[in-house]
Image (tube, rainbow, N blue to C red):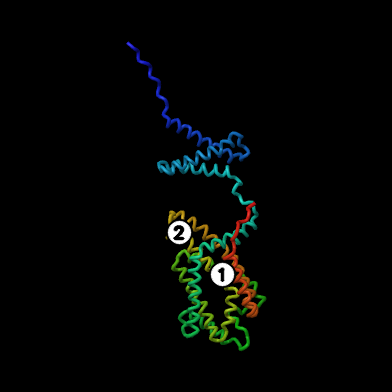
Amino acid sequence: MSSTPPVPPPAPAPSAARKSRRDEGLERLTRVCAKVDGSGVRSLSVEEVAALPRLYRYAATRLAHLETSGRDPDAARSLRAVLARAHGVLFHRVERDERNVLQRCADFLLREVPRTIRAEWRPLALSFGLLYGLALASFVAVSANLDLAWSLLDPAAVANEIQQLQSTPEGQPFRGNFIFGLEESPMFAGLIMAHNMSVGVLFFAAGLVPPLFAWAIATNGLMLGTYTAVAAHWGRGTEISSILWCHGVIELQAIVLAGAAGLVLVRGLFFPGAWTRAHALRLGARKAWTLLAPVFPLLFLAGLIEGFVSPHAPTGVRMMVAAVSGVALLAWALLGGRGSAPRSS
């Protein structure tokens, strides 16, 4: 009678062995990252430095598996934090911009902002079309019938402008609301800058509510056309245009840019496309900031012109400033950022 051979103990399940190795790899990566946090990269041994890329790749694979399966969101969240720290260790200084602050600011304003303006031409074109379309329509309408001015613009503003026009002696330049002297220009320039920047903030906020933004744009367009047409009835259209556009070429474009930034931000909420709404909002936030950032330097420059040039310079000088600033803005928006990107080091 043959004896039954002893049964060997069962071998550990392959999945358990793999799990043990997996845990060991993730724990080792965590220890390496903690060591860097405590003592810096130079504290790592040669073996740890050599193993770090392999551990990083493995952790990335594990994270992809966890997120795909969706069975353990807590583990995925924890692993994501470890992986982000490992990424920071591996790619330290690799993606760092070595340029100084002035170089980075110049690249942002002269290259990145114009590129974003061109990429977001649709909300900008819509905004400018509404502003200048209503300005032209109101100018034509009031030029034909002065009585319409009282309906298209605040009656108090119309009455004030007519009173100023009637009280301006023949042969004297019409200055509108700019009645302060040159010695008062620094103070008024500061007040104008503060006011303009608050308007820029309000237009950005209005852009977050598109109907409100449309109302703000329409109000400014009607004001622009009506105010100019009323002055034209007294033969002062050229003078008031030179005053308005001397600083207005920069000022009006800046506040429209602020409103368009708000539209770009809120667009992700209503039209996320292929993205989730949260991700679309994050993408829109960067574009919105890029559009909004140059608004305040532009309004600062417009305030200087409005305080020192618009009230005191002759008509020809004001028109020249308007033309030069308009050409400069167009060149910046249409040509900036074209060609190869500058080297970052």
Q: Residue furthest front?
A: 339
Residue 141 can be seen, yes or no: yes
Circle 2 sits on which residue? 268
Q: Residue furthest left?
A: 1
Residue at coordinates 58% horizontally, 68% vertically from top-left?
A: 330
Residue at coordinates 63% horizontally, 86% vertically from top-left?
A: 172
Residue 224 appears at what percent x and percent y?
52, 77
103 lies left or right of 237: right
Q: Quadrant of residue 293?
A: bottom right
Q: Residue furthest bottom?
A: 170
The vertical placement of 76 against 199, above or below, is above
Question: For numbered disc 2, what is the local secondary structure?
Answer: helix
Picture quarter with the N terminus: top left
Residue 216 appears at what percent x and percent y?
48, 71
The vertical placement of 315 against 100, above or below, is below
The vertical placement of 238 against 4, above or below, is below
Circle 1 sits on which residue? 196
